[in-house]
């Protein structure tokens, strides 16, 4: 009884880990698609667009540190970019 239960748990964990991995996009993200998200006008990000494109096209996602682009205020955030079939999605999280 214990062996089938252990096998079931191990296979469920393995499946969850494989599903949770990020994959590169089917079609590469272009610089134009990245610039259409307007992340460089909404956030102050130190990484260049080429670095973000490389990460998006190899891993499918990238998380960078940034700041909201508000004059006189300092709001540090994490910016997450996801390469999806619908385009590049931008999510932000407070640091």
Image (cartoon, rainbow, N blue to C red):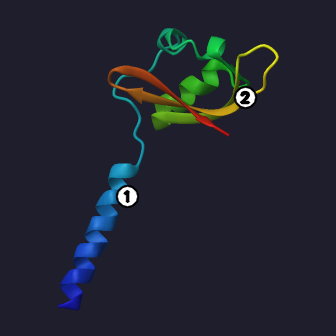
Residue 79 on image: x %, y % = 59, 31
Can the viewer see residue 51 in this picture?
Answer: yes
Q: Which mark is residue 75?
A: 2
Q: Residue furthest bottom?
A: 1
Residue 66 on image: x %, y % = 69, 28
Q: Nearer the viewer, residue 86 or 75?
A: 75
Q: Which mark is residue 73?
A: none
Residue 85 on image: x %, y % = 32, 24
Residue at image coords 71%, 17%: 69
Badge 1 vs badge 2, beta-carbon distance below 8 Å: no
Of the image marks 1 and 2, the number of the one nearer the N terminus: 1
Q: Which residue carries the number 1 mark?
A: 17
Q: Nearer the viewer, residue 76 or 80?
A: 76
Element assignment for label 2: loop
Please state if 60 lies on the left or on the right of 46 as rendered.
left
Crowd tier of the residue under label 2, counting other residues whose Cα lies within 10 Å: few below 14, some 14–19, many 20 or above:
few
Q: Against 79, is 19 above or below?
A: below
Q: Residue furthest front?
A: 73
Please state if 66 lies on the left or on the right of 15 as rendered.
right
Give the quarter of the figure containing the N terminus: bottom left
Instruction: Tally the numbered discs.
Output: 2
Residue at image coords 44%, 22%: 88
Quadrant in the rendering for residue 68: top right
Q: Residue furthest right?
A: 72
Q: CA distance from mark 1 to mark 2?
A: 33 Å
Can the viewer see residue 28 in this picture?
Answer: no
Give the quarter of the figure containing the C terminus: top right
Element assignment for label 1: helix
């Amino acid at each position: 009884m214990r062996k089938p239960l252990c096998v079931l748990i191990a296979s469920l964990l393995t499946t969850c880990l494989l599903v949770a991995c990020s994959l590169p996009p089917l079609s590469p993200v272009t610089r134009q698609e990245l610039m259409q998200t307007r992340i460089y006008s909404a956030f102050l990000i130190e990484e260049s667009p080429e670095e973000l494109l490389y990460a998006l096209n190899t891993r499918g996602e990238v998380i960078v540190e940034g700041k909201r682009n508000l004059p006189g205020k300092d709001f540090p955030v994490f910016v997450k970019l996801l390469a999806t079939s619908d385009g590049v999605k931008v999510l932000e999280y407070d640091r």
